[in-house]
Amino acid sequence: MTEMMRTEKDSLGSIEVPENALWGAQTQRALKNFAIGKDRIPIELIHALAKIKKAAAVVNYRLGVIDEERSALIAKAASEIAEGLHDNQFPIKVWQTGSGTQTNMNVNEVISNLASKASNQNLGSHIPVHPNDHVNQSQSTNDTFPAAIHIATVQRVRNQLLPEITSLINAFNNKSHAWGTIIKLGRTHLQDAVPLTLGQEVSAWRDQISTAHNRIEAALTELYPLPLGGTAIGTGLNAPNNFDIEIAAELSLLTDLPFTAAKNKFAIMASHDGLVHMMSELKMLAVSLLKVVNDIRILSCGPRAGLAELELPANEPGSSIMPGKINPTQCEAMAMVCTQIMGLDTAVAMAGSGGHLQMNAYKPLIGMNLMQSIQLLNDACRSCRLAMVEGLTPNQTRIQKHLEESLMLVTALTPEIGYEKASQIAIFAFEKSKSLREAAMELGHLDKDDFDRIVNPNTMANPHDQ
């Protein structure tokens, strides 16, 4: 069946638009001119733009720029969009103009048509609300689109990602305390080293992720200042006096977040260093998580030919051909997520450095990569915690075996008999397949009682607790 169409107009002329679509001419042109890939503008950015349109309508009325009726119609339509009631009306791809103009106009047009419907006017009539003259009043894409990325990033990081990271930290903290008395073999260069407790080992993971959490939280402060009111390049042309301060305050009320007006809008519009910084801290979280899950899959490798000091939850069969195999699937999923984040960070860094003069023309890419990174990290942290970390258990038999067989317990002898004699004991024990105690006694360096007094794994793991 042929789709019914209506005619809409913009500054370039007329174009056919699907009859029931809430978007208009500029959106329809974008669908034709930017048919690139499948990546749509993240819906979180659309919702954030809608919040900006609502706040602008309120402030524009307060400052006498638009009348009360138009302000109310815009605010109502924008609220519906922000609540997700019209998500299917935003079909434009990420790969468009670097300012995000097509998406800004997509939102403007949908609000205009929602206002027309509410006023019993025809779609596309721009009566009583015009997408440019009223919805976009006191704004340009150049200040609204980066502001939307700021808002969406802050909301998703504060409301979703940071709480999920905290839950993962708490899960590791619980394991660290529960395993605080399990003495095990440490490893450096993937070779045997001196003892530590399993709780100490896990505390490193906990605090590494906790530090990443704190870095991300600190990076939020750079995103609270918004460029709104700067309009095209930062001068504030076509925005009424105090619009920047008023709209930042209005958005703070809408979001319950401490947004402010940027003091230097030229800087925050010509570059997006705050967003690049946030992306780099998301990458640092990925770096930390990748190290942690790699440690876990090394410690759990086996179950018979590897270390097998940790036992993974048996969530699913690990192989289509080898029965009974349990693989570190959560580690692998997290590793892929972290690798993806590192690649997305590289793209954002390049995009951030690619601005020219008064505007950066990589905004949609930066916004998409941030939204994808936050989502991936949030989901991966939850999956890792629920499907692996909370169900991890120590294999104490294996841990004890590795500890007893370690040659590096000889390190405790060094202060008593010196490095050379301690080395002789370790080498002799290894070559003759003897225990350290047997080697020390045969070489005549220590008797049994002195050896047992000095070589105490618990004391070695907690040397300053005695």
Image (cartoon, helix red, strand yellow):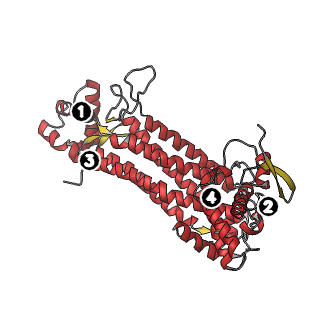
* Residue ID for mark 1: 397
N-terminal of the pair, mark 3 or mark 2, is 2
Hey, what amino acid is under mark 1? Thr
Residue 275 position, x and y percent, is 60, 59
* Residue ID for mark 3: 178
User: Residue 186's image quarter?
Assistant: top left
Q: CA distance from mark 4 to mark 3?
A: 48 Å
Q: CA distance from mark 3 to mark 2?
A: 67 Å
Label 3, residues with CA under 10 Å away: few <14, some 14-19, many ≥20: few
* Residue ID for mark 2: 125
Q: Is residue 94 above or below residue 225?
A: above
Residue 46 position, x and y percent, is 64, 56
N-terminal of the pair, mark 3 or mark 1, is 3
Contact between marks 4 and 2 (CB within 8 A): the answer is no
Query: Measuring 60% from the left and 47% from the top, which residue is drawn there?
Result: 344
Residue 14 position, x and y percent, is 86, 54
Label 1, residues with CA under 10 Å away: few <14, some 14-19, many ≥20: few
Which of labels 4 and 2 is toward the front? 2
Quadrant of the rendering where the C terminus is positioned? bottom left
Query: Measuring 50% from the left and 63% from the top, which residue is drawn there?
Result: 218
Contact between marks 3 and 2 (CB within 8 A): the answer is no
Q: CA distance from mark 3 to mark 1?
A: 17 Å
N-terminal of the pair, mark 4 or mark 2, is 4
Query: Measuring 74% from the left and 66% from the top, which residue is drawn there?
Result: 129
Q: CA distance from mark 4 to mark 2?
A: 20 Å
* Residue ID for mark 4: 81
